Amino acid sequence: MARQSRCSAKGSAPVTDPLSRRTFIKSAGAVATGLSVAPVAAENFNSSEPRPPASAIGRRIALSDLHYTDPVTRSEEGIPIGNGRMGSLVWTTPSRLRLQINRVDVYPSNRASNSFFEPHNDYCGGCAFLDIAFDGQPFASPKQHLSVYDGVMTIEGEGITVRIVPSRTHDVFAIAINDRRAHPARVSAVLRMLRYESKYLGAQSETDAVCQASTVQTRNHRATSTRHAMPGRIALTQDFSEAGHSCRSAVGLTFDDVGAASELIDETGVSLTTTRTGAITLFVGSSASFDPKADVLATTWSAVQAVRTQGFAAVAAETQGWWHRFWDQGSIELRSADGRAERAQAGYHYFLYLMASSSCGGPYPPKFNGMLWNTGGDVRAWGAQHWFTNLSCYYETMPGTGRFELMEPMFAMYSAMFDSCATAAKQQWGSQGIFIPETVYFDGLEPLPPTIAAELQDLYLERQPWSERSKAFLDYGATKHAHSSVWNWKATGQWKDGVYVVPERGDGCYGPTSHIFAATAKVAYLFWQKYEFTLDRDWLEKRAYPMLRGAVEFYRHHPRMQKGADGRYHLSGANNSEPVRGARDTNEDMFAIRGVLGALLRASQLLGSDTGMRATWREFLDHLAPLPLTTDSDALGRKEAPGPATFAAARTPVVKANPVFLRPDVNSLPSWFFDTCGVEAADGVVRDIGQATFDALVTADGPKPGASPGVLSKLGIAAATLGRAQAVAILVPNQMEPRAFPQSRTYKNGAALRNRMSMMEGAQALAAEHLGRASQALQMALLQSNPPAPGEDPVLHLVPALPRGWDASFKLAARGGFVVEATIAGGKIDALAILSQAGARCTLRNPFDAPAVVRRAGRPDVRMAGDYLRFDTNKGERVRIARASQE
């Protein structure tokens, strides 16, 4: 996960490239000058306060709405809107609405870049600043409302109402403005560059257009921004290039007023001013492409014209319909006397809103650090690479929602980098299969020159002393990004006399993420989980199986995976998450290997694939080193005092270990991700050790009422998976709406912002990681469908960790292709129905302390007793289960 390193540094690798810094990004909050502010016109709409939804589900979701009664003091607390690919926060000044248009597919640099070796200096996502300026100060004290159920934002100013709706079919925002003041004025919309240098490429004329461009050169990286002023419309395009990488983006804007006047203003902006007043609609669209020949502006105008032809009312109705169908897929309702359950419910649905607004239909997932909500131009702490631990906060929640369309951008990114990860497994580690690093560019890993790859492999496998690395190796790595796992032994450098001196972290080849292997297995296991939840054989064969096989073969052929004198396979030289480096038999890897091996063996059987390999894989699994425990003689942080064994972080020898993390890292906890340690776990010993480990991490008598889990913490998930209901009652609401994250010095001390997000990750790294973790825990408290062991059939377990005093109704997805609807009141199940989407056999932990009756249309009722209810289903069949005495 993205953590600042405070390791002592020694050694250096100088870089002598001249530096051309981005100088304009800190003007994100500046107001463009030279605006010609004048009056408007558009479609009429009801400007009264938004009415509450009429439907029960609408009222349930509306608890997640944002209501602001005064302007925000910082742009980061604006209101998020987006269509899954294009997004922005919306915030106000007294005379303006402010946005920064961002996209998931704008990556100015890629894996081969040599231009951004300073940490936090690479950037992505940003397309343009947008200001909508009004005469006077109508937004001195505006009321702002985000309807999560309808997907529309409303701003009520003094005599002015604005509604903003993102189209779900086109990358366009429709913004309807109704100026009811006695003397309505014209409106100006201004697009501004995100970066600027005083050297222009020059002005040029196009057909009926005036253009002006500015280029910022950062070593080998070139970023050109061009402003376009055309009759009735304006645009801002960006063109990024470095070596063979190209990325282009465009933002185009027009009103429904064909006579609106365009103008290039100051050095950074282009404005469009209406000729009408009263009511008018603005349409702003965007597009992006990695094709250097792509006409992104033409693509943008095509989308804008399509939405403009529809008109605001039609787009709003279409968007509202999309969101209503989205919420019909599933939701939860919670009630408790102290209101904490309702607040957890609000955070849960709001998290789903954020995901549907930023991760739907695009080719890449939103970055964890900012998502689509950046407001400061190119500034983005933690840069442009993806950390899996952070990304997992968003996507491990999704299977239980059944909304796999929101996972597809993540799946697509990792599938697309498969070949580069296979090359990295060979080059970097001398292994087979695939290696997905903890930190990686959107397009995977850069293929290395053979001589550099050979030396890197020898160094990372400790076959070559770190002190003997060659000048060629140091020179090659000097311009590579220190956040990248491949080069993570580098620390943050400093400029001295025009030379960027890069210190090392002091642990030889080991950096926080350099030797993390478990990310490969975790990604593969998410691919497997989609199969478990859908039983989609085509997905299993084409997408999940290659990932599972690649992960297993990487581990199996790793040069430091060796069978010891005890006849067990031991892995040395691995990191246990970030805090433990260069250890043996790490907690992360021992659980990861068990998880992907179990899944691979089952997948191979289902597909009839690799029949000749199953015995080899089974032997690997059966002879894998035992899980590291604190009672082991060689355990890291060996427990000397009497008491139950708990999971240890790893076994010795170890290169470096943070003493706080001698047990499993609470931000990862693989024992609960890989289906080895839940309430239905087949191995009771492992389950009991899991309970003891949770006690050791939290305290045996449970968390204190004020306990605040960290932003990435999985403690709530562990509590739910273990059936610890009262721990869930504390940890989930506190993580959902934190008063302050531990040890955070960021804005508001890490507390939740007005938009429920956090700046815990740093400047312009707005994130919803805490909402994702807490949402997953909440789902697990209501419904689990984990198998007894990886690769086995799932067991549905109703409300295993519902806190005492909480009532609940929910509709959630379960493994086996099931959707479960249930209502629990006063600790009793009032209703339970299971929809079978794939026609699989269902195993349900009997939720009653008595026999049950299973009812389905067209069949006689079946009375069942015992701990488990097992029954066959037909695809599309709805099965009701009730206590037998109720029938």
Image: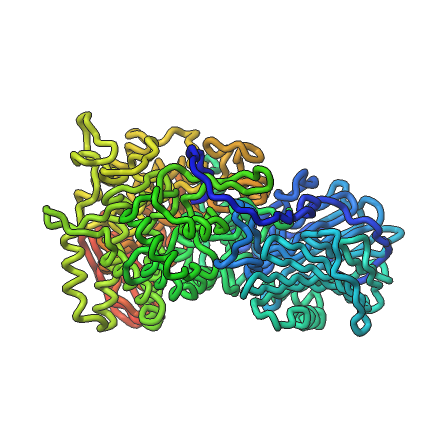
Q: Is residue 380 above or below residue 257?
A: above
Q: Nearer the viewer, residue 192 or 714?
A: 192
Residue 603 position, x and y percent, is 25, 66
Corner quadrant of residue 448: bottom left
Residue at image coords 18%, 61%: 617
Residue at image coords 40%, 40%: 713
Residue 848 seen in this snapshot: no
Residue 756 position, x and y percent, is 55, 43
Q: Nearer the viewer, residue 105 or 598?
A: 105
Residue 591 position, x and y percent, is 26, 49
Can you say which quadrant of the picture contains the C terminus? bottom left
- Report the side of 251 relative to 184 (left or right): left
Corner quadrant of residue 315: bottom right
Which residue extends farthest right? 183
Q: Is residue 736 above or below residue 226?
A: above
Residue 582 position, x and y percent, is 30, 42
